[in-house]
Image: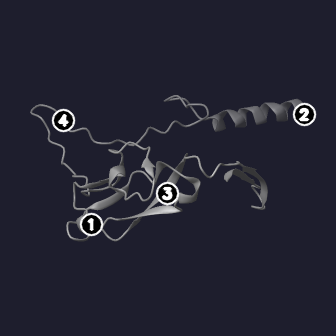
């Protein structure tokens, strides 16, 4: 029986397989996938949503009786109804090891968000979103001070006097 396998992450080729020797006369516990078929009436008629909660169940059986998967029909589910692990039909000497009350799938109502207008209380102002303040980099100019351009002509004249 295959227990685990490893694949190359890039090439997706099989690198290694772990096998387990089993006795065909002893019962073993295995996890089996659950596939859902049909369209739930709660979805079709009532506009609900079918959610798959659990996708596998654990059973105990002889190695010869291990099914590939369980197929369950969900067409009879209405809003508020669910399919439990105990509802899965078991054949032969299979025994359910998962909790019988474990939910496999259920139909729920679609929820829409309601947009509620903000209500202003008496004496309180409604807070309006404001834009963030933009902080400029660099030196701040003081009010009443002359810009640097005015200082530059004086420096130029001093430099001309030194060259003469």
Farthest residue toward the left? Answer: 122
The residue tagged 4 is: 125
Helix, strand or loop at label 4? It is: loop
What is the distance, in whole Å, between disc 3 and disc 4 at their CAs? 58 Å
Q: Label 3: which residue?
A: 33
Q: Does label 3 or label 2 sit earlier along the sequence?
A: 3
Q: Verify CB contact (< 8 Å) between mark 3 and mark 2.
A: no
Q: Is residue 130 something that shows in the picture?
A: yes
Q: Nearer the viewer, residue 118 or 138?
A: 118
Q: Quadrant of residue 164?
A: top right
Q: Residue at point 51% right, 36% down?
A: 135
Return the residue at label 2. Answer: 163
> Does the residue at mark 3 contact the one at mark 1 (Cβ under 8 Å)?
no
Q: Are marks 4 and 2 in contact (CB under 8 Å)?
A: no
**Residue 94 drawn at (x, y percent):** 45, 52
Q: Nearer the viewer, mark 1 or mark 2?
A: 1
In this rendering, would 91 be left or right of 86?
A: right
C-alpha distance separating marks 3 and 1: 23 Å
4 vs 2, front mark: 4
Residue that numbered label 1 is attached to: 43
Please state the horizontal and vertical placement of residue 80, each as a whole percent of the image: 22, 54
């Amino acid at each position: 029986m295959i227990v685990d396998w490893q694949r190359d992450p890039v090439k997706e080729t099989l690198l290694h397989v772990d096998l387990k020797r089993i006795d065909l006369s002893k019962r073993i516990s295995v996890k089996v996938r659950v596939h859902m078929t049909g369209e739930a009436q709660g979805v079709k008629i009532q506009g609900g949503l079918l959610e798959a909660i659990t996708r596998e169940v654990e059973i105990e059986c002889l190695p010869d009786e291990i099914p590939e998967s369980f197929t369950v029909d969900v067409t009879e589910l209405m809003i508020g109804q669910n399919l439990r692990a105990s509802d899965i039909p078991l054949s032969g000497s299979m025994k359910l090891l998962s909790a019988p009350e474990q939910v496999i799938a259920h139909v729920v109502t679609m929820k829409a968000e309601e947009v509620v207008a903000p209500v202003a209380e008496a004496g309180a102002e409604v807070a309006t979103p404001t834009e963030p303040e933009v902080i400029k980099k660099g030196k701040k100019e003081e009010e009443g001070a002359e810009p640097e351009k005015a200082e530059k002509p004086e420096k130029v004249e001093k430099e001309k006097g030194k060259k003469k």
